[in-house]
Amino acid sequence: MNITKNYHKDGGDVFVVGGEIRVVDDGKVTFDGIELKPAANQTNSTASTIADLKTDFNALLSKLKAAGLMLDDE
């Protein structure tokens, strides 16, 4: 039984977080060498045509990729 909210298990292969992770100062979160960060805001779409909706959707995809939350096209 664990009495702390955050702990390692399975020989260190798993880190269980029951609390909060705070990244401060110059800290960062990476996945496979890619820094993960909040994506830029995407305003609500006001598109009235499929073409405009496609433009808005592609803008969202670009922001997710720039934030490291989605891989770039190969």
Image (spheres, grey):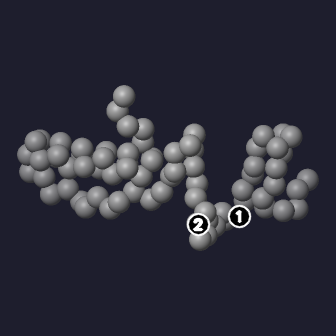
Separation (CA) of disc 1 from disc 2: 21 Å
Q: Residues within 10 Å of mark 1 (few under 14, many from 20)?
A: few
Q: Is residue 23 rendered to the left or right of residue 5?
A: left
Q: Secondary structure at mark 1?
A: loop
Q: Is residue 23 above or below residue 12?
A: below
The residue that appears at 66% across and 63% down in the rendered structure is 21
Q: Secondary structure at mark 2?
A: loop
The residue that appears at 12% across and 47% down in the rendered structure is 52
Q: Nearer the viewer, residue 46 or 58?
A: 58
Q: Nearer the viewer, residue 25 or 40?
A: 25
Q: Is residue 49 above or below residue 24?
A: above
Q: Which three-letter amino acid code belongs to the residue tagged 1?
A: Gly
The residue that appears at 42% across and 38% down in the rendered structure is 71
How many numbered dots are placed on residues in this image? 2
Disc nearest the viewer among 1 and 2: 2
The residue that appears at 82% across and 50% down in the rendered structure is 8
Question: Residue at label 1?
Answer: 19
- Numbered label attached to residue 26: 2
Q: Which three-letter amino acid code belongs to the residue tagged 2?
A: Asp
- Numbered label attached to residue 64: none
* Coordinates of residue 32 in the picture (x, y in percent): 57, 40
Quadrant occupied by the C terminus: top left
Q: Is residue 3 rendered to the left or right of residue 21?
A: right
- Check the image and name the residue furthest to the bottom: 25
* Coordinates of residue 48 in the picture (x, y in percent): 9, 51
* Coordinates of residue 44 in the picture (x, y in percent): 24, 60
- Check the image and name the residue furthest to the top: 74
Q: Residues within 10 Å of mark 2 (few under 14, many from 20)?
A: few
Q: Is residue 4 rendered to the left or right of residue 17?
A: right
Mark 2 or mark 1, which is nearer the start of the sequence?
A: 1
